[in-house]
């Protein structure tokens, strides 16, 4: 379950969707994360990247950005890739998780 899947994590009317183990059935935002003992809530399968065209994609990510969790959850960022086969291409991501193991201003794209 993404850390942005709990009520009150961001100033939004609805937090990030959370799913059952099958990855498609939506569960209540109060459902305990599967990472915790007895938890039944997971990330949803539809939170995967999608190509819009040859140079632009949309997706979801964990991010460690200034301002902390409340500032990061559910926000969107446009990323520009600077190396490898995707050099120069762009991707807009919505933050669905705060990624406690990430460095400052780092993104971990959900794939």
Image: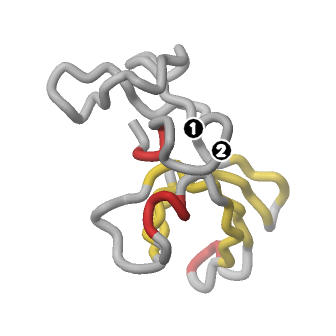
What is the quadrant of the N terminus in the image? top left
Residue, x 59% and y 43% (percent of image)? 48
**Residue at x-position 82% and y-position 52%:** 52
Q: Which mark is residue 12?
A: 2
Q: Residue at x 64, y 58 (%)?
A: 75
Q: Is residue 111 visible?
A: no
Residue at the far bottom: name it.
82
Instruction: Tell me how many marks there are.
Output: 2
Circle 1 is placed at which residue position?
15
Q: Secondary structure at mark 1?
A: loop
Q: Quadrant of residue 45?
A: top right
Q: Is residue 8 visible?
A: yes
Element marked by disc 2: loop
Would you say the residues marked 2 and 1 are in contact, meaning their CB atoms lie under 8 Å apart? yes
Mark 2 packing: few (<14 Cα in 10 Å), some, or many (20+)?
few
Q: Residue at x 73, y 73 (%)?
A: 89
């Amino acid at each position: 379950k993404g850390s942005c899947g709990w009520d009150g994590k961001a100033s939004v009317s609805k937090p990030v969707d959370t799913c059952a183990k099958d990855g498609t059935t939506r569960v209540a935002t109060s459902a305990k994360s599967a990472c915790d003992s007895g938890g039944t809530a997971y990330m949803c399968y539809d939170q995967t990247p999608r190509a819009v065209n040859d140079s632009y994609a949309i997706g979801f990510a964990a991010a460690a950005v200034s301002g902390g969790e409340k500032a990061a959850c559910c926000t969107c960022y446009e990323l520009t890739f600077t190396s490898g086969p995707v050099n120069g291409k762009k991707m807009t991501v919505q933050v669905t998780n705060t990624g406690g193991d990430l460095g400052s201003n780092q993104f971990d794209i959900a794939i």
